[in-house]
Image (tube, rainbow, N blue to C red):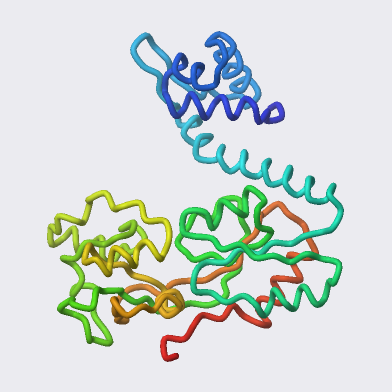
Amino acid sequence: MGDLDLRKIRYFIAVAQHLNFGRAAQALHIAQPVLTRQIRALEDDLGVQLFIRDQRRTELTPAGRQLLADAPALIELASGVRLRVGRAARGRRSFVVGFMPGLIVTGPVRALSDAHPDLDVGVLRTGWDDQVVVLLDGRADVGYIRLPTDQRGLRVEPLFTEDRFVILPVGHLLAGKDEVSIADLANEHLLQDPDAVPEWRDIATELRNRHAHREYPTLRTVEEKLEHVAGGRGIVILPASTAAFYRRPDVVQARVTDISVNQVCLAWQAGRRSRLISEFVALAHEHGAVGQSLDT
């Protein structure tokens, strides 16, 4: 088996996405015969067949589907290497910590900075969509992530768990309750990916809620979600620290009693060997990442 060529991997991704060599070649701005040769060379490198082609269609083989699942992470890892090498070439060392909304990571960040006065220690606010991406592409060296998420290419260290709270508009029938069950929410419109709240998804499907399999709106930030909740367009379910951090007068919150807790973890690229990462992991356990208390 030959070494993987990232250019060939990028060509493969284009063909796998289009399932048409002609359209993929146009998107890549190369001639179709060149693309065909590159894909055949990649298949030779791997010793497998990636596509099944006939006059009517192009399909991925099982090996092709596996490569498509893994390939984006390979590209992101390579980007991360380039980014870190570029930082090193500019002189002063840096270390970036990603963190999800609601988490306060000042303690371990300050401790690392105090221990290394010559190190620029920065923070990067992430979201559900990019909490892993920033680790793979090198924008962050280590990150506080919330599960569930794709853990491929990462080492993951559990830190703590949090209860989850539903956020409702102030005029909602459930407003004023301290606790609710998932059954109480089964007929609501969830403004986030139902797979992130499988308990809601399953009971909503069972009750044939018209929202159960409806495409949810693309709301990338907590602020956007809360604007929609306040406007009466639906509900969201958030970890305790996020719900507390984003309090506002036009929404209320209640603990959901019968769904799984949210797991907060520390994560970094699996292949990296860095004393700074090991040191930060120890500091994270020592100082913790504090979530805003719902009682404050």
Location of residue 227 by image quarter: bottom left
Q: Residue 31: image x %, image y %?
A: 56, 10
Q: Residue 101: image x %, image y %?
A: 49, 69
Residue 79, above or below 120: above
Taking 163 as reference, is 118 left or right? right
Q: Residue 235: image x %, image y %?
A: 27, 67
Which residue is at 57% across, 75% downward?
159
**Number of marks present in the image shown:** 0
Which residue is at 22% across, 51% downward?
213
Which residue is at 52% across, 71% downward?
264
Residue 108, above or below 57: below
Location of residue 244 by image quarter: bottom left
Taking 163 as reference, is 32 left or right? right
Residue 168, above or below 177: above
Which residue is at 45% across, 61% downward?
148
**Which of the two residues, 272 or 124, is positioned nearer the viewer here?**
124
Taking 72 as reference, is 226 left or right? left
